Image (cartoon, rainbow, N blue to C red):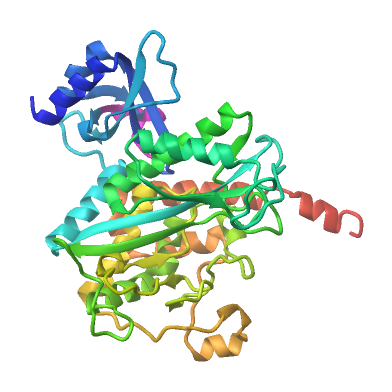
Amino acid sequence: MDEEKEFVLKMAHENNVKFVRLWFTDILGFLKSFAITTEELEGALEEGMGFDGSSIEGFARIDESDMIAMPDPSTFQILPWRPVKGGATARMFCDVLEPDGSPHQGDPRHVLKRMLKKAADMGFTFYVGPELEFFLLKSCESPDPLDQGGYFDLTPLDVASDIRREIALTLESMGIGVEYSHHEVAPSQHEIDLRYTDALTMADSTMTYRLVVKEIALKHGVYATFMPKPLQGENGSGMHTHQSLFQGERNAFFDPDDKYHLSEVGKRYIAGLMRHAPEITLVTNQWVNSYKRLVPGYEAPVYITWALRNRSDLIRVPVYKPGKERATRVEYRAPDPACNPYLAFAVMLAAGLEGIKRGYELPPPVERNVYEMTDQEREELGIGTLPGSLWEAIQLAEGSELVRETLGDHIFYKLIENKKIEWERYRTKVTAYELEEYLPVL
């Protein structure tokens, strides 16, 4: 048994762990789990644990339901919110395998690992740092905020400071680095930013983050939601994703002699994100509600532009600080925190790598506020838009070779099928808006 597995067994023994939760993710980004006792742990580390995949979204049909959850020992962590009386509880993320040991094509973690392998074959390591926003509400039954605070507000308007503090401390205790924690623009909206790291670790950390936020909120008697737009007329929640490529210890996006301090690799990566943005939006913004956030006027990106400072753009390049070339990065502002992070990171990376491989030309930055331009001005500058609804996003993704190749046929067709069902349910639902607007007059 290798050192990592020995370390897990040692840690489980020293911390009196009784149960180990094996975590994996379905294609929609919902965390799935089953628990084993520590008596089963050594066998699980060696051979994995079998489970029935027929009830997991996008996994298997009834007649091919046997799956294996193979724990990744590097992800072993104690769950600090679980009681320790009678034995602590730990978790490990798993790769989902077929009975013959080959990767299951419906496993989002495998999709990202496959994409990272493509980047590695080109000489790159992919790093990301997402900024996940969320709302704390009185309950899940109606969107009643806890406060009327605003951006960076402190007490007494921000009544959730202690909740944010406990979330940050819990994440740190699980080995997940936290950079910032603050109140966001909308009432009861918050943001906790995770420290930049490699994409696979970050996807695992994002899944952990979302569960920790919900667990700590529940402990305090409130409800946390990553729904992109729960409050009408207020900013929605985004997951601005900072990303860069490294070649060894060198940031491949940095060029000291360039006007924008961007290398050709960096420019082509941005050009790839811009060209393929419409077709990858179904993955980065996968819900009907996602497109209530992607509208002009609420700090959410709608137009496909890039700039150094302007926060109305889809892509922002943070201004270079001398001596901080390792921090050169691209901030892609479209994703929301209800996406599947494994698939979202994979398609963003795929778009950027396509720009590098094919030598896409980067258009000039747009330093004006795009929302204040006329339609004619945007057309003259060749500024495109993201899809305006889930249905538009489905159509663009369905015709995308890049998305199909990145996700693989299994997840690609399952995702399209699932999203068409969601759109049909939404399309046939009579909403409160229609009743308020039309019932009294028609």
Quadrant housing residue 147: top right
**Residue at screen point 62% across, 70% down:** 296
Q: How many marks?
A: 0
Residue 365 rendering spot, x and y as whole percentages: 42, 83
* Residue lying furthest right: 440
* Up/down of 220 relative to 210, above or below: above
Residue 206 rendering spot, x and y as whole percentages: 39, 44
- Assess whether residue 155 is covered by the magenta stretch: no
Q: Which residues are magenta?
A: 54-68
* Residue lying furthest left: 1
- Assess whether residue 65 is covered by the magenta stretch: yes
**Residue at screen point 28% across, 45% down:** 201
**Residue at screen point 40% across, 37% down:** 171
Q: In which quadrant is the C terminus drawn? A: bottom right
* Residue lying furthest top: 86
Residue 248 in sight in this render = yes
Residue 378 rendering spot, x and y as whole percentages: 54, 85
- Residue 344 located left or right of residue 222: left
**Foreground of the two, 296 or 430:** 296
Residue 25 in sight in this render = no
Quadrant housing residue 23: top left
* Up/down of 95 relative to 147, above or below: above
Q: In which quadrant is the N terminus drawn? A: top left
Residue 342 rendering spot, x and y as whole percentages: 34, 48
**Foreground of the two, 327 or 412:** 327
**Residue at screen point 31% across, 86% down:** 259
* Up/down of 68 relative to 188, above or below: above
